[in-house]
Image: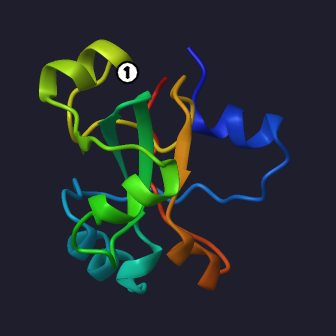
Amino acid sequence: MENIKDILKKHGFSFELINNDKPIYTAKEGADYFKINIGQTAATLIIYTDMGFYALVVSGERGRVNFKEIKRILNCKNVRLATKDEVKAVTGFLIGCVPLLGISLPYIIDNKFFQFSYIYMEEQEI
């Protein structure tokens, strides 16, 4: 199995692995733990659209997903969060454990990340 470190190296990204000594479950917990802006935390959600499933990587600053904006960007009528069964079926991961990179789906990346030099994510085995 490929991990995030291998993917980042393969594609020439600059990164640093930082280990944490406790589980982090929310963007706020991550921001507080690492003493960073909440916008630098990243989560991957799986959404279903008229055109199929997408990996949606959102900033912790968002608070919620703007489905109207996603409909506009993708020019489709129906967009919703994937169910827990759909997430498991299309990614192989449980909700809350979907890695930021390495999923074989098209990606939508939150433009809020572009204001930061770096973002924080949890490493998952893929």
Q: Secondary structure at mark 1?
A: helix
Outermost residue on the left side: it is: 84
Please provide percent x and percent y for residue 54: 44, 36
* Numbered label tally: 1
- Above or below, 17 against 120 in this view is above
Front in this rendered view, residue 1 or 51:
51
Please provide percent x and percent y for residue 85: 15, 19
Q: Residue at x 42, y 48 (%)?
A: 56
Please provide percent x and percent y for residue 71: 38, 53
Task: Indicate the amino acid at tag 1.
Answer: Thr
Q: Residue at x 49, y 48 (%)?
A: 74
Residue 105 visible, this orientation: yes
Q: Residue at x 27, y 82 (%)?
A: 32
Label 1: how many residues lie within 10 Å, few (<14), some (14-19) or many (20+)? many
- Above or below, 66 against 31 in this view is above
Q: Quadrant of residue 67?
A: bottom left
Q: Is residue 90 left or right of residue 123?
A: left
Front in this rendered view, residue 100 or 64:
64
User: Which residue position holds label 1?
Assistant: 91
Please provide percent x and percent y for residue 75: 48, 49
Q: Residue at x 48, y 44 (%)?
A: 100
The figure's colour scheme reads rainbow
Front in this rendered view, residue 122 or 55:
55
- Above or below, 35 against 11 in this view is below
Residue 42 visible, this orientation: no
Q: Quadrant of the N terminus?
A: top right
